[in-house]
């Protein structure tokens, strides 16, 4: 179907010449392969949209997991921001304590 020139074998030619005559042209292969791939892709997409496993389709699961990732990232960013704020507050406190004690060692 996809390689019509490869069906029959030509035993009358030497091997190196027979191999070159068996090489199919790229355009006829692409002319058959591209529509076939498009149909397979459409079938997979329909499967993912229409078929329910349990109560969910593929896109229900994908949407839920992406929402979970977004929430997780937001929580992690908030935790990181909280840690950074705490570090800044600790440094300011150390800086104030150093100034009150009579000077900062870094400035001397």
Image (cartoon, grey):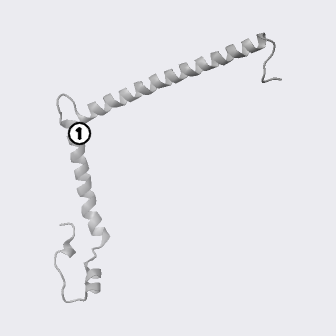
Q: Residue furthest top?
A: 100
Relative to the observer, which residue lies in front, 72 or 57?
Answer: 72
Residue placed at 52% from the left, 24% from the top? 80
Residue 105, relative to residue 38: is it above or below?
A: above
**What residue is at 28 percent from the left and 58 percent from the top?**
34
Label 1 neighbour load within 10 Å: few <14, some 14-19, many 20+: some
Q: Quadrant of the N terminus?
A: bottom left
Q: Position of residue 41 (x, y in %)?
A: 25, 49
Please give the name of the residue rendered at 24% of the width and 63% of the height, measured from the top-left corner: 32
* Place of residue 52 in the rendered image (x, y in percent of width and height, measured from the top left): 18, 33
Query: Front-most of 51 and 89?
Result: 89
In the image, residue 21 sits, relative to residue 28, either above or below, namely below
Q: Which residue is mark 1?
A: 48
Up the image or down, 61 lies above or below 103; here it is below
| Residue 71 figure quarter | top left
**On screen, residue 77 above or below 24:** above
């Amino acid at each position: 179907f996809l390689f019509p020139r490869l069906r029959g074998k030509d035993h009358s030619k030497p091997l190196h010449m027979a191999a070159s005559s068996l090489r199919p042209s790229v355009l006829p292969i692409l002319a058959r392969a591209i529509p076939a791939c498009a149909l397979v892709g459409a079938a997979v997409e329909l499967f993912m949209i229409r078929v329910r496993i349990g109560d969910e389709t593929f896109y229900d699961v994908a949407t839920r997991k992406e929402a979970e990732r977004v929430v997780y990232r937001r929580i992690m960013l908030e935790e990181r921001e909280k840690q950074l704020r705490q570090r800044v507050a600790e440094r300011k406190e150390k800086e104030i304590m150093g100034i009150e004690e009579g000077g900062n060692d870094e400035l001397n």
